[in-house]
Amino acid sequence: MGAVVVQDLTYQYQPGGGYVLKGINCKVNQGEVVVVTGLSGCGKSTLCLCISGAIRHQRDGVMTGKVMVNGRNIREISGARLSLEVGMVFQDPDSQLFSPTVEDEIAFAPENLCLPPERIRERVNKVMELLGIATLREANPCHLSGGEKHLVALGAVLALDPPVLILDEVMSQLDTAGKKKVAGVLEKLRDRGKTIIAVEHNLEAVAFSDRMMVLESGELIRFERTPSLLDDRDFLRARGLIDT
Ligand SMILES: Nc1ncnc2c1ncn2[C@@H]1O[C@H](COP(=O)(O)OP(=O)(O)O)[C@@H](O)[C@H]1O
Ligand SMILES: [Mg+2]
């Protein structure tokens, strides 16, 4: 059984509108890091929203097919329960940051679970240490850089400790050192058995991943082991996924 199984998934933002996802099928195993790449507008974020269940908030959208997370159809899991199964960091982190301080932001979800205060403090400290953001504890998330906001949003998701993580371009606004740091964190999370689906354009930065999928105009055109895809320079160049 895959940790994430997507079957014949299609998506339209409006009934009768164009298909943004056109029959996606894939299976991601538990403990795998899978990178999703493809040109801007090919449907990466929409796929993330479908897998995480966040697509429910698009009122007019039409989704067909099925997304299973750890053996359960996400349509049948309630919102609160779903966030314990799958956590998502959005491409635009402003859409998920709302607390006055970084510490509050990361503590928010465990507080909602009504965990005892010392357990919450423990989780917040652990997450901050893992992500290297302890110095931002008292900062207002609104005032942070884009890269820092992504880290805080990731921290808030990790505080709930879901087995599946969906990360939409969390490295995009970080410098090379920042990308390396996040790659190291993702490797650690993989070692702990997390299943990670991460959208990323900079393929070098995620060379440690297990497999990569390439989307093109809403279709999954490649899904294979990372070294094999990275070796196919002609394909990557022809599709505009690398420059050289
Ligand atoms: N809220 C929306 N309403 C209508 N169309 C949208 C919406 N969000 C994205 N789209 C369209 O869906 C397609 C895929 O977008 P997206 O999933 O964001 O692609 P990517 O993340 O690969 O850049 C694009 O053509 C985009 O314009
Ligand atoms: Mg996107």
Image (cartoon, rainbow, N blue to C red):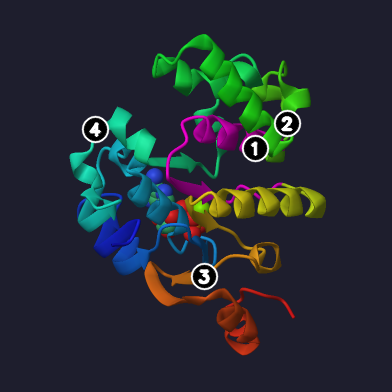
Residue 198's tag is: none
Q: Which amino acid, mark 3?
A: Met
At a point 68% along the width and 18% down the height, the residue shown is 140
Q: Judge from the rendering whether residue 16 lies leftward or rightward of residue 162; answer left or right.
A: left
How much space separates mark 1 and mark 2, taking CA atoms? 8 Å
Is residue 219 in view from this perspective?
A: yes
Q: Counting residues from the N terminus, which is met first, the one under dot 3 or under dot 1?
A: 1
Q: Earlier in the sequence, mark 2 or mark 4?
A: 4
Label drawn at residue 78 = 4
Percent across and percent down for residue 54 are 35, 40
Furthest-bottom residue in this view: 234
Sequence-first tag of 1 and 4: 4
Kind of residue at disc 4 = Ser
Circle nearer the N terminus (1, 2): 2
Where disc 4 sits, the SS reads loop
Give x and y (percent) for residue 14: 26, 49
Query: Where is residue 234 drawn, in percent x and y?
Result: 62, 89
Q: Quadrant of the N terminus?
A: bottom left
- Which mark is drawn over residue 151? 1
- Kindly state the secondary structure of the residue where label 2 is placed: loop
**Where, quadrant-wise, is the C terminus in this rendering?**
bottom right
Query: Which residue shows up at 37% across the image and 35% down it?
Result: 84
Is the C-beta of the residue carrying label 2 under 8 Å from the nearest atom of ligand 2? Answer: no
Which residue lies under the disc numbered 2? 133
Q: Which residue is mark 3?
A: 212
Q: Is mark 4 within 8 Å of ligand 1?
A: no
Dot 3 or dot 2, earlier in sequence = 2
Contact between labelled residues 2 and 1, with CB atoms less than 8 Å apart? yes
Mark 1: which amino acid? Answer: Leu
